[in-house]
Image (cartoon, rainbow, N blue to C red):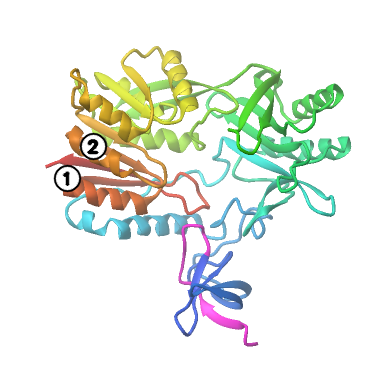
Amino acid sequence: MTKKQLQTTILSFNDKGLSISKDQNNNKIVSINGVIEDEVLLELNKKRRNIIKGKILEVIKPSKYRTSPKCSHFEMCGGCTLQNYKYESQLAFKEKMVLGTFKEEINNGANFYSIVESNPFEYRNKMEFSFSQNRANDNFLGLMIKGANRYVFNIKRCYLVKEWFSNVLNNTRSWFEKEKINPYRPLDNVGLLRNLIIREGINCNEKMVVLVLSDLNELTKDQINSFIETVKKSVDDTSKLSIFLKIIHAKKGSPTTYEEILLFGKDHINEKLNININEINLELNFKISPSAFFQPNTTQAQKLFSLALKYLNIQKDDIVYDLYTGTGTLGLILSKLAKKVIGIELNIDACKNANQNIKNNNIDNFTILNGDVGKVLNDLISKKEYISPDVVCVDPPRAGLDDLAIENIKVLNPKKILYISCNIKTQKQNIDILKNYGYIPIIIAPIDQFPHTTHIENIIILKRT
């Protein structure tokens, strides 16, 4: 054992999935691909701010939580960080994180529901792969290398999606190598091919492929036609296939814009969500364009919204505010149960998609307002016709609720609050403020939205005391 090596035990993992251990001086060591309770031999690298980067040279004694990854790319791929954990262990550790974060609330009477599991493989309905070229002019199409965000490797099969995704990926890689088309290199601002986006309407069995380009050059007509044929031969049924070009216009000092060009099929794919709330069955229909947001795990989205609204128990005369409404998925469901729903969303494209979804589902009691949540609430509250909501639903970005938004929730004074979050740390910080405003958490229910990652989706219901 050299001076730069250490035998130690993996203690935990952080929110990026990096393994955490400590040296004899209690300095934190981060490494890749360790499993809690592994005994490992580490090679130690530079120390920065009391954190040492380590490389696992050997797993001396494997943890009881460890398993062999299904994917041959796991050691290299940045897409999965926990695939070397048994799935039941992933669930247990995620549940433990929620229990630890909200220990006070649970001890004070909040009902805790066990984490809802997912199908651990082939659960995603969208993947975005990157084209890349190194200084030696070697070309790549795949995912980022773990721990090296600027470097791409040629993935052959991704088990987070169905096999046809990989067929399109591998055939597209062969296509661009044969055609000798250069990937886009952002540091040099040269090249053409940026990304390959593949999407599926799981419940409608419709497929979409989007080739994303820079505007520095153009594909020839023959290259476009050969790309279309490449994609078509990658799928079993082309009758429900859409193929697009998406051209990115990016210049320093100007907003980035894009244009979408339909090459084959319809200008959208269809998808539906089936929601079950206390024996009420709802079906919502969506038209998904190349840039439209949709929940990446269709099955878990159905469970998430079904459970959240079961716990929330909306009444038919309720007025509901859906803050950070996005493309309006939650608001659409709420509109089927409540008297009136007002959705607020900052992103103008998301608002356009939300209004299209409202139209597609023939809904007339759901209104979308575009703008910053806190500022829009200021305007609403100041109006003579303002009516206080019975329920407020929030699903904010990872940073959580900002100060103005949370202050205005206090002014709204709803009877109940539904808080859905993808970041339990900021969710806890916001919940502590809401408790000071007279709200108590009554239900805490985590969902495993993305197996083999550290991601946790968490439902909390609060009521006014």
Judge left or right: residue 153 versus residue 50. right
Q: Is residue 62 above or below residue 274?
A: below
Rounded to the nearest angstrom, the CA distance separating label 1 from label 2 is 9 Å
How many dots with numbers?
2
Q: Secondary structure at mark 1?
A: loop
| Dot 2 amino acid type | Ile
Chief secondary structure of the magenta portion:
loop
Residue 54 vs residue 206, the one in the foreground: 54
Please tell me in which quadrant of the rendered image residue 374 appears.
Answer: top left
**Residue 355 seen in the figure:** yes
Residue bearing the label numbered 2: 409
Judge left or right: residue 315 versus residue 234. left
Mark 1 vs mark 2: which is more N-terminal?
2
Q: Which residues are magenta?
A: 1-18
Residue 163 pos. (x, y %): 67, 38
Judge left or right: residue 166 versus residue 428. right
Query: Pointer 1 and pointer 2: residues touching (CB < 8 Å)?
Result: yes
Please tell me which residue is depicted at 39% across the width and 45% down the height of the picture: 116
Can you tell which mark lies on residue 437?
Answer: 1
Can you tell which mark lies on residue 404?
Answer: none
Please tell me which residue is depicted at 49% across the width and 69% down the height of the picture: 20
Residue 251 pos. (x, y %): 66, 36
Say which quadrant the C terminus sits in: top left
**Residue 112 seen in the figure:** no
